[in-house]
Image: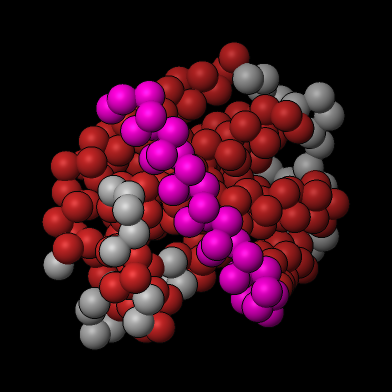
Amino acid sequence: MKPGGIRAFQSAALNMAEKDLRIEFRRSYEVLSILTFAVGSILICSFAWSGGSVGSKPEVASAALWIIIFFASILTFTTSFTREADLGTLGGLKTLPCSPLAILFGKIIYGTALLFLVECALIPFSIIFLNLDLSGRFPALLLVCLLGAIGLSFAGSFVSGLVMFSEGKTLLLSFLLIPICVPVLIPSVVATEKIIGGSGITEVMPELRLLIAFLLLISAIMILTFTFVLEE
């Protein structure tokens, strides 16, 4: 891709993400519902575990954290491409002077921003209510959460595009996301468990490499197939 083409691609993707984020925050009840679900789930876990006595175990806390993030991602991506199909604005997207991949990457940026916002709200509540000690390791956890959010956004945006014309797209999205997101969730849970248990960024590098490998793999799949998905 030529330098001018790269700049046009980036501009189209960023404009798409900005448009979606503006719509999302204009109808702030959707963002608030996702945040309420995430924070409420942590509170329920805290009460169920008697003030965090069980939740403070790294393996339990990390699994609970990423299960909540995963279900929050389902709520996020049910309105990604499906909103365009339901509102009839998909035809307008197809006429834009940009590649379908630019539209997809705009949706990925939008999904990453929303998921990372949820994670940033979720982590402080997890520290308080699950009695987690992250002294000196908070940046490492944020990095894992960011890469996990990017991975979930790649998978969620792609699947949302695949099912946007389906009859039961919400249910189908949930079923398809579970197996596709396993390569993101497993290394994210393991890395989070290590960080909560006292490890630093160097100890979680194998998991971070797995997340990056997944991003490269799904990027190759999207580049080869998404043009046909949007045309259909």
Q: Residue at x 58, y 39 (%)?
A: 146
Residue 155 appears at what percent x and percent y?
Answer: 36, 51
Q: Which residues lie in the magenta part?
A: 1-30
Q: Residue at x 65, y 40 (%)?
A: 58
Give the quadrant of the N terminus.
top left
Could you say which is closer to the camera, residue 71 or residue 161? 161
Q: Residue at x 29, y 73 (%)?
A: 91
- Left or right position of 132 against 187: right
Q: Is residue 153 visible?
A: no
Q: Is residue 24 magenta?
A: yes
Which residue is outermost to the top?
202
Q: Is residue 8 magenta?
A: yes
Please determine whether, in this image, residue 138 is positioned above or below residue 131: above
Please determine whether, in this image, residue 218 is positioned above or below residue 53: above
Q: Is residue 124 visible?
A: yes
Quarter holding residue 228: bottom left
Residue 29 appears at what percent x and percent y?
Answer: 68, 79
- Left or right position of 50 against 24: right
Could you say which is closer to the camera, residue 96 or residue 20? 96
Residue 216 appears at what percent x and percent y?
Answer: 32, 31
